[in-house]
Amino acid sequence: MQLDIRLPIGLMFALLGVLLTAFGFLAGKDVYQKSLGINVNAWWGLVMLIFGVIMFLLGRRGAAAARLTEESPEGKKIEEMEHRAGLEK
Amino acid sequence: MKLTYLDWTIMLVYFVFVLGIGVALKRYMKTSTDFFLSGRSIPAWITGLAFISANLGAQEVIGMGASGAKYGIMTSHFYWIGAIPAMAFVGIFMMPFYYGSRARSVPEYLKLRFDEKTRGLNAISFAIMTVFSSGISLYAMGLLLETLLGWDFSVSILLAAAIVLVYVFLGGLTSAIYNEVLQFFLIVFGFAPLVFLGLKDAGGWAGLQTRLATVATAHGFGSGAWTESWHYMGSSSANPMGVEWFGLAMGLGFVLSFGYWCTDFLVVQRAMAAKSMSAARRTPLIAAVPKMFFPFLVILPGMIAIALTYKSGATGFALPKKLDGTFNYDLAIPMMLGHYFPTGMLGVGLTALMASFMSGMAGNVTAFNTVWTYDIYQSYIKRGASDQHYLWMGRMATIFGIAISVAAAYVTTRFNNIMDMLQLVFAFVNAPLFATFLLGMFWKRTTGHGAFFGLLSGTIAAAIHHGLTLPVGAVAGVKGGWFGATHIYPSEMAQNFWTAIFAWTACFVVTIVVSLVTRPRDDKDLVGLVYSLTERPGAEDVPWYQRPTVLALIVLLAALVLNIIFW
């Protein structure tokens, strides 16, 4: 079984989401003058966290991964072609 | 712009994940097919997102933001009549030959369809082009981080190059594709709140429209010139781009966009890594869906930036100026990030910006190492070695490809004009390519000699046209006119579009003429390579909503609707 791309994506976004949300709710609010008074860290951090968790869960279930050439029918055809054409030994 | 520990931590998290993906994939790189083609095993949605992300380099994010400020919503033509129809075309009509012929690269398809010399010409020009474009984007990144954050130029380009090197070296194309998907989401999440905040500051879409009307009238155009994409296309003097509808539709919509999306190995390689014919055909079609909405992510911020500069919003954002007093359009998006994002979100935004540079560079590097190993090394230097040898060569090519890019970035700091010249030459080489593929795939009479001499004449025609014309206000030199300017175009863009139209036409005509006087290949050698001699790929057993033709129709219809909404 190979690495499903949704696992690292999910983990990374969940982690970034936690960082932003925690900072947004816990730290001082005076930095949000820049963002028109909106606490973008908290809100957007929460969105990123939810996205991350969904990706991670999908990754746990599914099989969206690259496979080894030897396990992939199309990959094997390429190898056969290379041998037939004398491109490699 | 001041960063805090939070921003640094976010960047660090991103770097750790990017490198981690490379490390995790290392043990799956067993054969050269794993390394260069991901074993042809990747699901369509992943290759689809990588398809657009590989193109989402510096040019896209910084350049489209700058154009949004300079030309307004007209910039969306690059998407809605440029990229989208071309992506539908490559998925429906061209992918069956790229994927079905088992060519491992675009130059290799040319070898199978035509002959060795056509492949050689394409492979060598493409290889040189990709390393230099990745150098140019490194340079742009170094310069940007220096201006924005005061980072040392050398430190930032060497760090970025080293990270890309590590993950491509370890995990090959799979690693590049995986990271492109990660980068795609990061770019979306990093820029979406920027558009929201900017738009809110400008008073929503209605507020933006009134502000942009001020911008348009200040430039001497009709009031909707920045917010209506087709309304002012009747004559080249009525719109800020200086292009009329015919030059736009033919030059950008047909020649340049089809030339790029249908023949550039940088993007086509992603589709070639898909796990089946139907997945390969769906790759550009899936890519077209988010691509269609990218104008809202990358062009809109530029429009907001210029609108707020002319008619200030609540927070007083304004575009910075260059030393000569003109606006520095390239800084539109980066300056907005710094202006609207508080610490935390700022880290995400800057990381997204860096991700876009890296994905663009990794795309170039993987395309380079494949073309180098398959089309140059295996074809002309060492044929018939073991598979492990080519895998090793791919890794070496990754190292020296990146080394040349870094060197090119340093050369650019010294001699800016050399890079302008190089990009010009690339444009000449690229412009006629689509004519060759179109004839090669759909007219079985096309011969190798025809293709080769067609390409050469197309390139020469581009150079001659460029040498005889000038954009208004420019002096003869890199901008053209070195044979004496016989025609003045209203803008540089108009000149580029017409150069492409001339190059394409020359290549098209010469290819046909030479093909008619040279001996064609037997029909049996062209099975799987030419439309009329190839069985149409069946629907395969996929549900209706996954059928390429259905997807293509949906995508084209949606693009049409967007054109009408913003007419």
Image: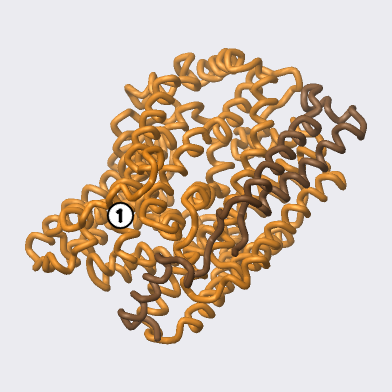
Chain colours: A brown, B orange
Q: Position of residue A74 (x, y in %)?
A: 40, 65
Residue at 53 percent of width and 38 percent of height:
B64
Residue B23 visible here: yes
Residue at 44 percent of width and 57 percent of height:
B274
Q: Is residue B500 above or below residue A78?
A: above
Assign a secondary structure to mark 1: helix
Crowd tier of the residue under label 1, counting other residues whose Cα lies within 10 Å: few below 14, some 14–19, many 20 or above: many
- Label 1 belongs to which residue? B96
Q: Which chain contains the residue that carries disc 1?
A: B
Residue B462 visible here: no
Quadrant position of residue B560: top left
Q: Position of residue B245 (x, y in %)?
A: 32, 28
Q: Nearer the viewer, residue B515 or B490?
A: B515
Residue at 47 percent of width and 44 percent of height:
B287
Residue at 66 percent of width and 50 percent of height:
A9
Quadrant position of residue B20: bottom right
Quadrant position of residue B139: bottom right
Q: Is residue B380 above or below residue B497?
A: below
Give the residue type at disc 1. Answer: Pro
Q: Is residue B560 above or below residue B42?
A: above
Q: Position of residue B221 (x, y in %)?
A: 45, 18
